[in-house]
Image: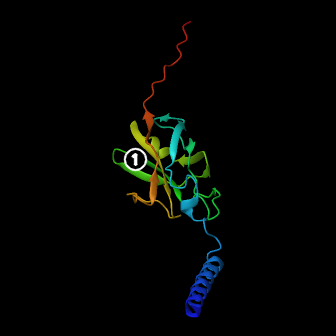
Amino acid sequence: MLTTKKIKWLISLTLASILLVLALIGGDWGKTYAAIDGFFDPPHIDQLFPSGYPVGWHTDWIIISGSNFSGYDSEGNPFGDTGDTRVRLSGKNYDEMFTPKQIIEDGISIEVDGLFFGQPESYIITVVRSTNRTIPTIPTIDPVDLVSNKVFFQIYETTFLPIINKK
């Protein structure tokens, strides 16, 4: 009977020691990326401004509004740097990732060079955000890169009607 009490006491002491060691080592339990609500939600584009430009337009900005554009730090706070988010612009014979000039949780702005506006064309814009703080690439890596919905962007032909003055 005395030996069973000693064995029970020894098992209890061992379990308590293991729990104490785990508590000291893992003081940040529950602070992983998986515990952050919305971390694995892909970005979502609500609208573009503008939704297109005329052929021959100069260098300009495209502003994308939506949600889940920025990543999160280890504490679960969104960070505003552009390290893990890119804007993908793809069309016929064209596919490129742009680094955002500014990013907030619900908006991104990118600068597009005027040479891009040379021909009428339809493009698809998506936002790609990496979940492990790497730079998204083409092609995107499926479990790591979260891709938003597709939104169309148009470079369109314009005709200007001259004002005719009759005398």
Instruction: From the top left corner, tell me how far across and down residue 18 is, in percent.
Output: 59, 82
Image point (64%, 76%), residue name: 23
Instruction: State the colouring used for the structure image.
Output: rainbow
Please name the residue that numbered disc 1 is placed on: 90
Q: Amino acid at mark 1?
A: Ser
Q: Nearer the viewer, residue 24 or 97?
A: 24
Q: Quick check: 82 above or below 7?
A: above
The N terminus sits in image quarter: bottom right
Residue 48 appears in the picture as rendered: yes
Q: Is residue 128 above or below residue 158?
A: below
Task: Give the camera-side residue of 112 and 134.
Answer: 134
Expressed as whole percent of the image width and height from the top left, the position of residue 86 reads 50, 54
Report which quarter residue 35 is drawn in. bottom right
Q: Could you say where residue 4 lies in the image, as x and y percent from the top left?
A: 55, 89
Image point (40%, 60%), residue name: 141
How many badges with numbers are in the image? 1
The location of residue 122, given as percent across then percent down, is 39, 37
Which quadrant would the C terminus be assigned to in this image?
top right
Residue 119 at least partly seen: no
Question: Circle 1: is it few (<14), some (14-19), or many (20+) Cα within 10 Å?
Answer: some
Nearest to the observer: residue 124 or residue 72: 72
Residue occupying the point 62% across, 51% down: 102
Q: Residue furthest top?
A: 167
Q: State the residue lying farthest toward the bottom.
A: 3
Residue that lies at the very extreme toward the left in this rendered image: 93
**Residue 127 located left or right of residue 63:** left
* Circle 1 SS class: strand
